[in-house]
Image (spheres, rainbow, N blue to C red):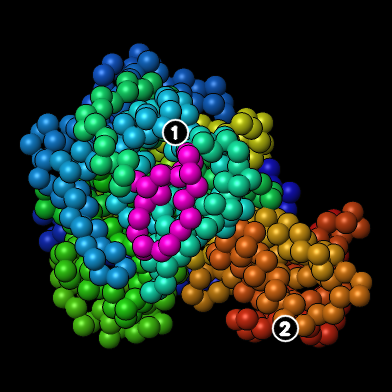
Amino acid sequence: MPSDTEPPEDRAAIEALFDEVRTIPPSDEFKKRALITDTSLYDEANQDWQGFWARQALALDWYDEWDTILEWKLPFAQWFVGGTLNVSHNCLDRHVANGLADRVAYHWEGEPGDTRTITYGELLNEVQKFANVLKGLGVERGDRVNIYLPMIPELPVAMLACARIGAPHSVVFGGFSAEALRDRILDAQAKVLITADGGWRRGSAVPLKVNADNAVAEAPTIEHVVVVRRTEADVPMQDGRDQWWHDLMADAFPRCEPERMDAEDLLYLLYTSGTTAKPKGIMHTTGGYLTQVAFTHKYVFDLHADTDVYWCAADIGWVTGHSYIVYGPLANGATSVMYEGTPDFPDKDRWWSIIERYGVTILYCAPTGIRTFMKWGTQYPEAHDMSSLRVLGSVGEPINPEAWMWYWEHIGGGRCPVVDTWWQTETGAIMISPLPGATTLKPGSATFPLPGIAAEVVDEKGNKVELGGGYLTLTRPWPSMLRGIYGDPERYRETYWSRFEDRYFAGDGAKLDDGGYFWLLGRVDDVMNISGHRVSTTEVESALVDHPSVAEAAVVGTKDETTGQAIIAFVTLKGGQEPSDERGEELRKHVTAKIGAIARPKTVIFTDDLPKTRSGKIMRRLLRDVADGRDLGDTTTLADPAVVEEIKRRATVSPTEE
Ligand code: PRX
């Protein structure tokens, strides 16, 4: 249970629109071809939810079918017990065996404009070769492999090769720092690291190998580093430890039998921020995970794999990319677009030119992106023919109704259902979302739990709320649920299952309207959501106090028009240290070096004191109010006595957080 849980705040925009919410039923045109146009899937799942999931699991290829659908010893679930399968076989071999070797798996586009088209047949070849490379480096079933790559085709190849030989991967987002990478390698005790000389981002080369070297210098479990050549940057290669991807692949044997994995074998670890300074290694296993990502990818996006061109514009370093760039789409034999760089390179219409070029039919992205495009203006999408689009998705943070409507009108041409999909790293797959041919949409609402999923809103005491706001909980296990936190079962129980009896608590506030629609209200714990990415307040605070000048720090997420939330750091310096703009900048850089650019505070506010309860707990809510009520500049560091006064005044007026 997070220590600083507060009642959920309502979103004013939703509140205001609540009485006059527009509803958008699926159009007849869309329904003509839609996979699901009625409540049949919900009805089926309501009858027998375990049987429902078992039928979805049968869409995969199994070596041995399971004996038991679900073994549930709260909070530990096992799905499809006794079943065996291989994820890379399901994503590749079976499609090739079905005559789809020439179907495009990825239309890949690098930021500089270079392109690669990779068919299922080619992907299978690459994956088999790289699986043999890993074996040659001594990787065995059960060994962990760390991956720190840009958005290049070698990233899914490496993941699938790991899955093929039964070596769980741990992908670390390329925007994380050397220290963050080191900590994740150490926690996973990985043997091999796969990285690149660099990656392209907004026209510059990101120095991944430099970070990797710094991380590995302090991570002795790593025996080998495989380096992909991408930017051609001159990087040092350590003899005996570092090898080029292309050299290893040139000699690799082209056939590698997939391992028969148990349904509950670990597929991957993915680290995510919690309410403490230490990221959690979220564990996802094989059979249940693949079942639910394949099911949701097919039905939420109404996938017609033979004709659709699907683009999830997230980074594979986050769970969205794992589930909806790699495993879901490939399990379904879909054709995807994969793009390496930023949306504004070389110009602000890059995404729309990609949609036009490849005839993208399904686009999945985050509200922060949409709000950024709103700011840039409609002239960019208007310059491109995007009539191929037919479904739009949103993920990662609450989407405000205004952004939803803009997306609907200016990207979807008023013709494409917008599916707002709520889920988490921990849930592995989409949990609450419309089915586009069946659900009447309300802009800003993720609508209903998917078939087979049971979600409820509860009050402070854990009583079910039928109407109004409260805490979002899940009341039944689901196939792609996390199986725990790597190496820390107690933290797993404590974090997710202790706040409300017999319920998984997601950390989010939610509200139910009189039609039973779910409206997500954001995090109610010490986790911030910056551009759809989770950042822990405590982790940023630890990074700040690690700086020699800092005595104490408190970090809050404040509302931000574009990124959803922005990080504001209140900092008390040690005696003899003077606040200054330069010092603020130094601290922001320090956090970037410790964690990564996503965790860099937007503003640093120096104060003499931090407001605390009598028991010494920092009153973050008060700081959040102070931050929300002020116009905080982008890089400005305010050594502003008025702020301090305000904090002091309010601390004495309402010392309520005891
Ligand atoms: O607060 C919720 C928000 O993102 C959190 C999960 O973050 P992460 O594990 O990084 O996964 C992001 C991609 C699945 C949730 O606890 N969130 C995610 N999707 C939505 C959302 N909030 C509102 N609406 C959503 N559609």
Q: Is residue 505 magenta?
A: no
Residue 444 at least partly seen: no
* Circle 2: residue type: Asp
Vertical placement of residue 64 versus 399, above or below: above
Circles 1 and 2: CB atoms closer than 8 Å: no
Image quadrant where one finds the N terminus = top right
Image point 38% across, 74% down: which residue? Answer: 203
Query: Is tag 1's residue or tag 2's residue first in the polypeptide sequence?
Result: 1
The percent coordinates of residue 491 (x first, y second) are 66, 36
Vertical placement of residue 504 versus 366, above or below: above
Q: Which residue is mark 2?
A: 581
Which residue reaches farthest left? Answer: 99
Q: Can you tell which quarter of the image residue 59 is in? A: top left
Image point 57% across, 58% down: which residue? Answer: 177
Q: Is residue 243 magenta?
A: yes
Q: Which residue is mark 1?
A: 168
**Magenta-colored span:** 224-245
Mark 1–mark 2 distance (CA, rounded to whole Å): 45 Å
Foreground residue, 321 or 412?
321
